[in-house]
Amino acid sequence: QKEVEQDPGPLSVPEGAIVSLNCTYSNSAFQYFMWYRQYSRKGPELLMYTYSSGNKEDGRFTAQVDKSSKYISLFIRDSQPSDSATYLCAMSTQYNFNKFYFGSGTKLNVKP
Amino acid sequence: EPEVTQTPSHQVTQMGQEVILRCVPISNHLYFYWYRQILGQKVEFLVSFYNNEISEKSEIFDDQFSVERPDGSNFTLKIRSTKLEDSAMYFCASSEEQRNTEAFFGQGTRLTVV
């Protein structure tokens, strides 16, 4: 199943760095794009969602969607050790909104 | 802060046995979901449930699986005859509105079939 591709990492950065996490997808019907954060032994926690194309900013987090390239990104500014987690992208279509397709997750380690 | 709770956190069962995973969704939510994550693999959609019936299910959700909302607060996933390949983390989620992307996930139940 290769509908959503995500580099598994691990990605290791120093505290304060800007982090870029990315996913590509193949299904042009995807309209809703989400980023979840998952700490070890916990459930996914919704960070951001975007409908269709464009950017969305929330504090240190910025989500970008480029539907023409089928590419989404999550940027984390001023990264903190507490941001160390696995980041999952997820997406769904307008017709089967309930059914999320997840990426495999990127493990991020922010070093103090 | 309201949260989705799942019990048990870890369940070990013998192959062929029935298992029931339990979830208490957030109280005013109307849509409920089960997802699973096999170790090292992606989170996969199993089923969504609304108004006391299944609204969508995946190919994984075959006749061995069933869901129920027995008492208006719990939401359960039953696996009738477990197989080794059912070993996974099972996540329950709920959301207030169908098009509200804020689906809240529980912490998961780790199912180990031996």
Image (tube, coloured by chain):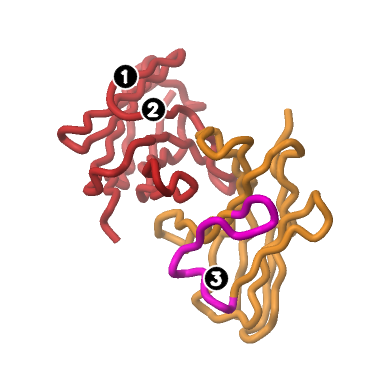
Chain colours: A red, B orange
Q: In the picture provided, is A27 more to the left or to the right than B54?
A: left
Contact between marks 1 and 3 (CB within 8 A): the answer is no
Residue B63 in magenta stretch: yes
- Which of the 4 quarters of the picture holds residue A80? top left
Q: Type of residue at label 2? A: Thr
Q: What stretch is highlighted in magenta?
A: B49-64
Circles 2 and 3 on the same subunit: no
Tell me the residue at 46%/64% (across/down): B58
Same chain for marks 1 and 3? no
Please give the label number shown on residue A50. 2
Residue to which mark 1 is pinned: A55
Secondary element under disc 2, as helix, strand or loop, is strand
**Which chain does the residue under circle 2 lie in?**
A
Q: Position of residue B13 (x, y in %)?
A: 68, 77
The chain letter for the residue carrying disc 1 is A
Q: How crowded is mark 2: few (under 14 residues within 10 Å), some or many (20 or more)?
A: many
Labels 2 and 1 touching (C-beta < 8 A):
yes
Going by the image, does B55 lie left or right of A72?
right
| Residue A100 x/y as whole percent | 44, 48
Q: In which quarter of the image is residue A105?
A: top left
Q: Distance between the residues labelled 2 and 1?
A: 8 Å
